[in-house]
Image: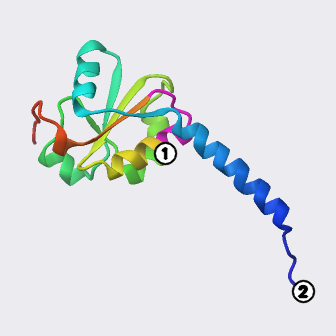
Amino acid sequence: MKKRIPIFTLLIVFVFAGLFVGCASSFVTQISAEQAYAMMNESGDFVLIDARTPAEFAQSRIRGAISIPYIEIIRRAPYEILDKDIMILVYCQSGRRSAIAARRLANLGFTNIYDFGGINSWTFGTISG
């Protein structure tokens, strides 16, 4: 005979899961590329994450960015970004992967995350190679 989980128990689990995700996403702020550029020029203490693939990163990237593809954030970020409170700016190609990466960073306990979407909207120059 299968054991049934009471609906009340499931409801409590979903409520707590929602609270956890809600708390994590409160550490992520959506900003424009212009705002990111200004923040980068005002602060010398930040991490700029390119959440695209290594091939995309090699083709073009924003100067100073480090490559941590969004699918590797959970595995790599805790070892590569040691200060959980440092300002983190995240981008990808169009904004979908940076949003995922930013949420994952928040779930890992990082508290100062800014997602400025895609390099497609970056008008301040890129480098390649």
In the image, which residues are magenta? 104-112
Viewed as shown, does residue 50 lie left or right of 99?
Answer: left
Name the image quarter holding the N terminus: bottom right
Viewed as shown, does residue 111 lie left or right of 40?
Answer: right
Mark 1 to mark 2 CA distance (whole Å)? 39 Å
Q: Residue at x 12, y 48 (%)?
A: 59
Q: Nearer the viewer, residue 25 or 62?
A: 25
Helix, strand or loop for disc 2: loop
Here the colouring is rainbow
- Magenta-colored stretch includes residue 107: yes
Helix, strand or loop for disc 1: helix
Rendering coords of residue 14 (x, y %): 70, 56
Rendering coords of residue 38 (x, y %): 24, 20
Under mark 2, the amino acid is Met
Rendering coords of residue 107 (x, y %): 55, 42
Under mark 1, the amino acid is Arg
Residue 63: quadrant of the picture: top left
Residue 104's disc is: 1
The local crowd at label 1, few if under 14, some if 14 to 19, many if 20 or more residues have their Cα within 10 Å, is many
Mark 2, residue position: 1
Q: Residue at x 27, y 53 (%)?
A: 53
Q: Residue at x 45, y 39 (%)?
A: 77
The relative height of residue 89 versus residue 117 in the rendered view (above or below) is: above
Kindly give the residue lying farthest to the bottom in the view shown. Answer: 1
Mark closer to the chain start, 1 or 2: 2
Q: Residue at x 64, y 43 (%)?
A: 20
Kindly give the residue lying farthest to the right in the view shown. Answer: 1
Q: Nearer the viewer, residue 58 or 48?
A: 48
Residue 12: quadrant of the picture: bottom right
Viewed as shown, does residue 128 lie left or right of 46?
Answer: left
The local crowd at label 2, few if under 14, some if 14 to 19, many if 20 or more residues have their Cα within 10 Å, is few
